[in-house]
Image: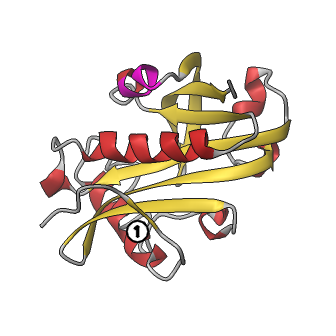
C-alpha cells in the first residue's frame, strides 16, 4: 500500500535508502548517462544531505521508499554547489534549496511528485520569516514548479556527478501576508 502523503524524516537513519533510490530512479530515465551505479556506486548524495538544516521527505509502499525529495535551508547561497550566484540574487539571507525529487520507475505517473512538491511548499509556507526558495529543474519539471508559484530565472548548467547538464533555474519568494 502506498502512503497517502509524504512523511518528513525526523532522523537520518534512512538516508542510504534515499541515496540508492536516487541512482535507481535516474538509471531508468533519459538521464542515466549522468547518474548510474557505475558513476555513483554508493548512491547519489552531497554534503547538504547530512546538514542538520536539510529536510527529507519520503513516500513508502510497505516499508520500501518509492519517492523522496529534500529541502535545504541555507544562510549563504555559496553553501549550495549550484550556480545560483550567477543569477544576481542576494547571496546572504534566508534561502531554501528545493532539490533531489525522485520517484521509483514503477510508481511514476501516480501523482507522487506533486505530493512531494505540496509537502515542501507547505513546509515553506509554515515558516514565519520571508525567504527565497531556489530550485533547478529539468525541462519536464518546469511546468509543475511554475504552477506552484515558482518564477523562471534563467537557463543554467548544473554539475551532476561528473558531467554538466542543462537545467532551468527558478525561484519562489515566500511572503508573509
Lateral position of residue 66 relative to residue 44, left or right:
left
Task: Name the residue at 78% across, 31% down.
Answer: 85
Q: Which residues are magenta?
A: 144-148
Q: Quadrant of residue 88?
A: top right
Q: Quadrant of the C terminus?
A: top right
Q: Position of residue 161 (x, y in %)?
A: 52, 54
**Residue 162 coordinates in the image, percent (x, y):** 54, 52
Q: Total of numbered circles in the picture?
A: 1
Q: Where is 150 relative to 83, above or below?
A: above
For the N terminus, which image quadrant? bottom left
Q: Quadrant of residue 113?
A: top left
- The residue under the point 33% across, 28% down is 140
In the image, taking residue 25 as reference, residue 148 lies left or right, namely: right
Say if the magenta span includes residue 147: yes
Q: Position of residue 12 (x, y in %)?
A: 53, 77
Q: Residue at x 22, y 52 (%)?
A: 28
Q: Which residue, given by chain and number where applicable, does mark 1 sit on?
A: 18
Residue 38 appears at what percent x and percent y?
37, 67
Dominant SS in magenta: helix
Classify 108 as above or below 1: above
**Which quarter of the figure has residue 105?**
bottom left
At label 1, counting other C-alpha atoms closer than 10 Å, the crowd grade (few under 14, some 14-19, many 20 or more) is many
Viewer-proximal residue, 70 or 104?
Answer: 70
Report whether 6 appears left or right of 136: left
Q: Secondary structure at mark 1?
A: helix
Compared with residue 70, is residue 16 higher up or lower down, i.e. above or below? below
Residue at the image point whose x is 66% and y is 45% from the top: 127
| Left or right for 130, reference 103 | right
Outermost residue on the front side: it is 177
Amino acid at each position: 500500500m502506498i502512503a497517502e502523503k509524504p512523511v518528513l524524516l525526523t532522523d537520518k537513519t534512512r538516508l542510504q535508502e534515499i541515496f540508492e533510490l536516487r541512482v535507481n530512479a535516474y538509471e531508468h530515465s533519459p538521464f542515466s548517462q549522468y547518474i548510474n551505479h557505475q558513476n555513483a556506486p554508493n548512491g547519489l548524495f552531497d554534503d547538504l544531505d547530512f546538514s542538520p538544516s536539510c529536510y527529507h521527505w519520503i513516500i513508502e509502499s510497505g516499508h520500501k521508499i518509492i519517492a523522496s525529495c529534500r529541502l535545504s535551508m541555507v544562510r549563504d547561497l555559496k553553501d549550495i554547489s549550484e550556480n545560483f550566484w550567477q543569477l544576481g540574487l542576494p547571496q546572504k539571507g534566508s534561502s531554501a534549496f528545493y532539490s533531489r525529487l525522485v520517484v521509483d520507475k514503477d510508481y511514476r505517473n501516480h501523482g507522487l511528485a506533486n505530493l512531494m512538491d505540496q509537502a515542501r511548499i507547505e513546509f515553506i509556507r509554515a515558516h514565519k520569516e520571508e525567504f527565497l526558495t531556489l530550485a533547478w529543474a529539468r525541462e519536464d519539471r518546469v511546468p509543475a514548479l511554475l504552477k506552484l508559484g515558482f518564477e523562471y530565472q534563467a537557463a543554467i548548467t548544473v554539475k551532476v556527478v561528473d558531467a554538466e547538464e542543462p537545467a532551468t533555474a527558478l525561484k519562489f519568494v515566500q511572503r508573509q501576508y
